[in-house]
Image (cartoon, rainbow, N blue to C red):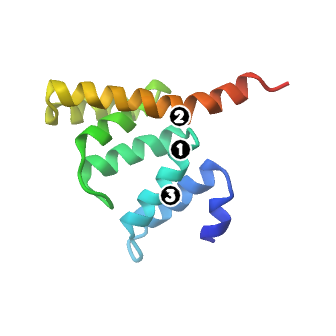
Amino acid sequence: MAQYAEDRSCITQFELGELFEKNERARDYPSAFKWYLHSAKHGYRTAQHRLGTMYARGAGVTRNYVEAYAWCKVSAAQHSRRAILKLKKIEPHLSVEQISLARQLSRQYYEMYVAPSANRVLFRK
């Protein structure tokens, strides 16, 4: 199943991440994180928000508020209301310098993972 999802859409990857995160019997946060990351790198804003949440909680990954803010900022740039709310919760945990770093990181992530997908959609014939 994992190999199949590796080759599938970002939504399938996200759904696999959800299975690992939400299944009470077989919860596996590191695997959930892995699949959310795959999906996020394909520009899926819900996965980007979920990554930010996992970084903020330290679920499946070491807690990192800079990464949490950066991923939520990328999702928020794509009009995710949940990500916008999450940014407000994360911000008090960061210094001014860390917020600046997180914003810089979010721009890099946006350029690498969102902009190429948006261009493919815009330029289809």
Residue 70 is situated, as x and y percent measured from the top left of the image, at: 35, 34
How far apart are labels 2 and 1 at the CA level?
8 Å
43 on left or right of 92: right
Please state, as top left, top right, bottom left or bottom right, where the C terminus lies in the image. top right
| Of callouts 3 and 2, the N-terminal one | 3
8 on left or right of 23: right
How far apart are labels 1 and 3 at the CA level?
10 Å
Task: Give the label on residue 35, or none.
Answer: 3
Secondary structure beneath disc 2? helix
Please state, as top left, top right, bottom left or bottom right, where the N terminus lies in the image. bottom right
Identify which residue is drawn at 35% across, 43% down: 52
| Of callouts 1 and 3, the N-terminal one | 3
Q: Quadrant of residue 116?
A: top right
Secondary structure beneath disc 3? helix
Residue under label 1: 41
How far apart are labels 3 and 2 at the CA level?
18 Å
Q: Please determine whether, in this image, residue 22 is positioned above or below residue 90.
A: below
| Of callouts 2 and 1, the N-terminal one | 1
Q: Please determine whether, in this image, residue 53 is positioned above or below residue 19.
A: above
Residue 20 is situated, as x and y percent measured from the top left of the image, at: 45, 66
Residue under label 2: 112
The amino acid marked with disc number 2 is Met
Q: Mark 2: few, some, or many residues within 10 Å (few <14, many ≥20)?
A: some
Identify which residue is drawn at 41% across, 62% down: 21
Identify which residue is drawn at 58% across, 43% down: 42
